[in-house]
Image (cartoon, rainbow, N blue to C red):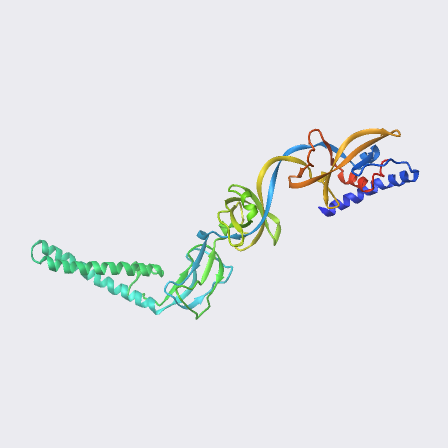
Amino acid sequence: MKKISNILFLAAAMIFASCGSSEKEEGEHEVLGPNQIEVNATQFKTAGITLGKLQERSIRSILKVNGTVNAPPQNTASVSAKLGGFVKSTGSVQGSPVQKGQTLAMIENMAFIELQQNYLETKARFAYAEIEYNRHRALYKENVYSEKNVQQVETEYKTLKSQLKGLEEKLKMIGIAPSGLTEDNITSVLPLTAPISGYIQTVNVNIGKYVNPTDVLFEIVDSRNVILELTLFEKDIPMVAKGQRLTFRTPNDPGTIYEGVVYQAGQSLGPDKTAKAYATIASAGGKLLSGMYVNAEIETANRPVVAVPQESVVTFDSAFYIFIHRGTRMENGKQIHDFEALRVTKGSTDNGFTEITLPAGTKPVDLEIVVKGAYSVLSAWKNSGEMAC
């Protein structure tokens, strides 16, 4: 934008300079005030100056923040070997896509054999105890056995039943279906499978490595439902609220703009005096990965303000100005347009319009400003009003 503004200013200077030099030779020109500018009718037309009324518009205030793409807890999984063991084989690498239930590695452990043996032995003892329990109950009803004998058999039956149930759950935890286990298919090697679909973010295994149950071997992220985690400075926290819309882009692909909506903001302040805001993403398209940095713009308000076309505001000596049209008059038989440079405070820009704050005491009602060709008027002003001819 700055480069374009410089080009416009140079073009405007060329338009006004030729006329100014001839006028200077004649030595006839009135002295103007410090913020007063004169433009004659020919210059006005050649420069394409257009006037318009100063008015109020609804402008969105934009808060610029930084953050990262993250996966919510329900879309992230840490994979461990529940009983530990040695890594017998693995074909998974970082970045690989995986489906729920897909084998990530094969784990070998003698404890697998012992658990399966205990289950089958307990299952056999339970089957016998169940038969004995039912038989003793039937005989007790016929007064053949004493109540004490029945209670002893019942205790054995219930103890084995609870042990069998516990062993079944342990087998399920390591991926063995109890219903399909027999004496002929006991194994020391079991697959470690993916609990969710997504892609592998972290791999911490290699063949032959011994792993403990507490070791995280793989981290899987479902990138289809990523969110934004944005960092808010303390002063910005009151400006952000649930439901606000935002746009963002990644530094490695600044040409692609994504949209989102804030769903939680500023609930707690961290030691570094910042807070986190979280936003859903309208459509990631699978291009956003957990951990990516983003630059976001949050629409914090939509309020009526005094606003002008973006090209109406010019920069001069590190300050912002607009040009007020103070009317026309005749001078030496020529029509002259009188302008006044008015210093303003520049605010947010939205859809081609820029918010401005006028000096104290200035009323925007009925003010006519330059809405097109402001850099041409700036050229005349920078040349100290010598351009009227």
Which of the two residues, 169 or 312, is positioned nearer the viewer here?
A: 312
Where residue 231 appears, as percent x and y from the top left, is 55, 50
Where residue 286 appears, as percent x and y from the top left, is 53, 51
Q: Toward which corner of the image does residue 382 lie, by quadrant? A: top right
Q: Residue furthest bottom?
A: 208
The image quadrant where one finds the C terminus is: top right
Q: Is residue 217 left or right of residue 13?
A: left
Which of the two residues, 63 or 281, is positioned nearer the viewer here?
A: 63
Q: Residue furthest right?
A: 26
**Can I make out residue 104 in this image?**
yes
Residue that appears at 36% across and 68% down: 109
Where residue 66 appears, as percent x and y from the top left, is 57, 51
Q: Residue furthest left?
A: 143
Q: Is residue 49 left or right of residue 216?
A: right
Residue that appears at 44% across and 56% down: 77
**Can I make out residue 184 in this image?**
no
Which of the two residues, 154 or 347, is positioned nearer the viewer here?
A: 347
Q: Is residue 323 left or right of residue 216?
A: right
